[in-house]
């Protein structure tokens, strides 16, 4: 028998499904189906859905369940505008000079991301971009 998946493992798996398009906007996320899929109980699934709600990927409606958040094109545009401003602010407040090892780490993550784009490897694109921004915001002493 398989061990139950922890809430963060469940959240990561569902997040990947959403980001990679395997789950669609406004798709219902049925707790019992997720319990069966991850061989766990509702408490773990609910914690995972709560984590995804905090990230803005899932909407939870009391007594109605959870759905994948459906974003309008305008909402997506606004999210990217905010992200762009955060990145610019992070770069402005990074203490200089930046250690060569930190620059090298950013360059390596950029190379991984570019190679993933060429290969069409969406999962690596997603995670290399995420890691790049974690390092960037870490250099600025900002929470990622």
Image (cartoon, grey):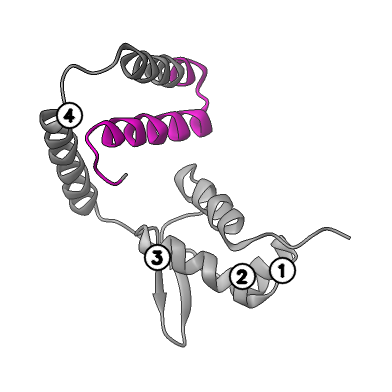
Q: Residue at x 29, y 46 (%)?
A: 143
Q: Are marks 1 and 3 in contact (CB under 8 Å)?
A: no
Q: Are marks 2 and 1 in contact (CB under 8 Å)?
A: yes
Q: Which residue is drawn at 22% across and 34% down?
A: 140
In the image, residue 39 above or below residue 113: below
Q: In this view, does 116 lie to the left or right of 70?
A: right
Q: Name the residue under label 3.
A: 53
Q: How packed is label 4: few (under 14 Cα within 10 Å), some, or many (20 or more)?
A: some
- The question of residue 128 being in magenta is answered with yes
* Mark carried by residue 94: 4
The residues bearing labels 2 and 4 have C-alpha atoms spaced at a distance of 38 Å
Residue 94 x, y percent position in the rendering: 17, 29
Q: In which quarter of the image is the C terminus?
A: top left
Q: Name the residue under label 1.
A: 40
Q: Name the residue under label 2.
A: 44
Range of magenta residues: 115-143
Q: Main secondary structure of the magenta part?
A: helix
The residues bearing labels 4 and 3 have C-alpha atoms spaced at a distance of 30 Å
Q: In this view, does 54 lie to the left or right of 83?
A: right
In this rendering, the label closer to the viewer, 2 or 4: 4
For the residue pair 131 and 13, the one nearer the viewer reads as 131
Q: Is mark 2 on a helix, strand or loop?
A: helix
The residues bearing labels 1 and 3 have C-alpha atoms spaced at a distance of 20 Å
């Amino acid at each position: 028998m398989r061990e139950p998946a922890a809430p963060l493992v469940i959240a990561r798996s569902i997040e990947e499904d959403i980001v990679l398009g395997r789950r669609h906007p406004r798709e219902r996320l049925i707790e019992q189906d997720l319990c069966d899929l991850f061989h766990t109980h509702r408490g773990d699934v609910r914690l995972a859905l709560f984590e995804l709600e905090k990230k803005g990927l899932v909407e939870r409606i009391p007594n109605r369940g959870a759905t994948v958040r459906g974003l309008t094109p305008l909402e997506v545009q606004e999210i990217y505008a905010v992200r762009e401003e955060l990145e610019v602010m992070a770069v402005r407040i990074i203490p200089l000079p930046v250690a060569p090892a930190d620059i090298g780490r950013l360059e390596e993550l950029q190379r991984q991301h570019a190679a993933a784009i060429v290969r069409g490897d969406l999962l690596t694109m997603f995670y290399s971009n995420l890691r790049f921004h974690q390092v960037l915001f870490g250099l600025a002493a900002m929470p990622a």
